[in-house]
Image (cartoon, helix red, strand yellow):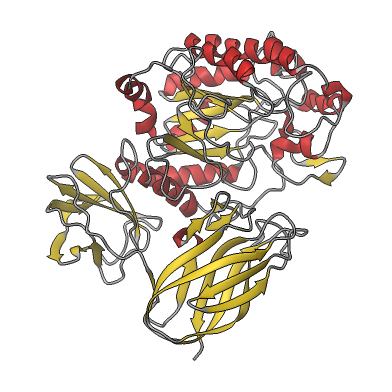
Amino acid sequence: MAGAQPAATPVGDSANPYAGETPEQRDARMKWWREARFGLFIHWGVYSVPAGTYHDKQIGGIGEWIMYNGKIPVAEYREFARHFNPVKYNADEWVRTAKDAGMKYIVITSKHHDGFALFDSKASDWNVVKATPYGKDLLKQLAEACQRHGLKLGFYYSQAQDWNNKGGGVCGQHWDPAQDGDMGEYIRKVAVPQVKEILSGYPISILWWDTPCGMTKEYADQLIPLLKLRPGIIHNNRLGVYPGDSETPEQEIPATGFKGRDWETCMTMNDTWGYKSYDNNWKPTQVLLRNLIDIASKGGNYLLNVGPTSEGLIPAPSVQRLKEVGEWMKVNGEAIYATTASPFKKLPWGRCTQKPGKLYLHVFDWPSDGRLAVPLASPIKKAYLLADKARALTVESNADGKVLTVPVASPSAHAGVVVLEITSPPEVIATSSRIRQAADGTLTLRAADAELIGDSIRTETKGSGEPNIGFWTDAKDFARWSVTITKTGSFDVEATFACAPGSEGSEVTLSIGNQEYPQTVPATQGWDDFVSERVGQLAIDKTGPLDIVLKATTMPRGAVVNLRSIVFKPVN
């Protein structure tokens, strides 16, 4: 994987088989994908042999990029294939694991940036059949298992970036003369034939392009017509030039989705896509589930990754988390599948998805007093827990909407789901989106609640999965929180942040009304090594609405900070 690609500019070109597609035709083609909401990503290849280590040294970065990050010569990297022997691979077990987790489709790396194909390709001998002791087509087995269990199958294909086949593109510079060659020839002799092979030889429903480094319209025009080989196939926005069917945010959940565009967030369970033996920074199941809910509430799909070992095993922590997600989905899947985005701009206690006649309230912060406030004017025909449909909930109306009487304990430790049956389209009551202090005066400014202004700054999810402000690579970008102050006084300020060594030193200013508090960002051990530190004490002397702004005044080393939260604690 690599950073998310920007949306390509739509091109009305005759090479694109979908150029003349009507909205009705597109809706019919995308129907199953929009209803699925949840899929499994699989990053698997020769990189699982070194598993993050080269010459006894742990190589930084994501596992499948070890050849690039370690600048491993082609001949030396190819030796790893001699040890790629996935004799424990059980395609049927993989598909059942995905299905039991509630997933509806699978996307696997048919060829990643190292150019190694998991299928028997005639266009390059650098493939699992010809270069490994295993000697069998891995994708054929997976395709057969998906058909047996009723899951759709997609292939990821790195169409431009290829570090082994001569002439393949590199996001940067070649480091081995063996990589040199003509990219046009690579497109003609490797990429085009291999895309033909996977589209004509396997019953796939998705083609997942990646990283169009060096791609031109001339090159893309040789690939886009091949989609005709698999009528109805869905493809993403990473081919280059052509916009595809979906946006592909990576390791982040966009704050408001993508208006007028289908989209799919892909995320890891730990910090890598391809297997790394020492990456044990696993996200809790609750984070994975709430990511799924958050994405569905914004109208997107969630593509959650596993990175199998060179023996063909999905790591046990991944399997366990998928099992736990599946347990929640067995009860609450109705609130995810075939739903559309929330009608509410924001809910203080969770998220909402909907279907015609039904609202599904996903409650993260279950009310301890058993009273759930919903800013809804529409009459409610019936309210109940999805986990207990026979038990009707009491509904009261007031000027702010509805108040539901719910059990004191949530039916799920991750997210309890309340169903509201309504007879008309939901009429939402506008509420203030300002952040309020807690009863004791504590004010918490979370990354997820910030308004982010700028072209690069955005929220992402790293480490334990709590969202953070990241990609802050433009000093002109800034974050703003709109708050309501009810208790004044002096406050200790604590920030939870991360900053990789070598990137420290940015000067930031926290502005509260007309007061400014400057700080210098120190280094932590990495961009995902979050620490909480007291940054000072300040006074807030007026109640009422207030904007709190965090800006960078200098950015000497290319990035500002990754920020999870700023907390104001009253000084007693």
- Closer to us: 194 or 136: 194
Locate the N terminus by quadrant: top right
Residue 137 picture location, percent across and down: 63, 16
Residue 499 picture location, percent across and down: 69, 61
Using the image, determine if residue 79 lies above or below residue 63: above
Instruction: Give the farthest residue toward the bottom.
Output: 572
Residue positioned 65% across, 24% down in the render: 215
Q: Is residue 362 visible?
A: yes
Residue 3 picture location, percent across and down: 62, 40
- Closer to us: 95 or 68: 68
Direction from residue 124 to residue 385 in the image, left or right: left
Direction from residue 394 to residue 140 in the image, left or right: right
- Closer to us: 49 or 349: 349
Residue positioned 53% across, 47% down in the render: 252
Using the image, determine if residue 282 lies above or below residue 8: below
Residue positioned 33% across, 64% down in the render: 366
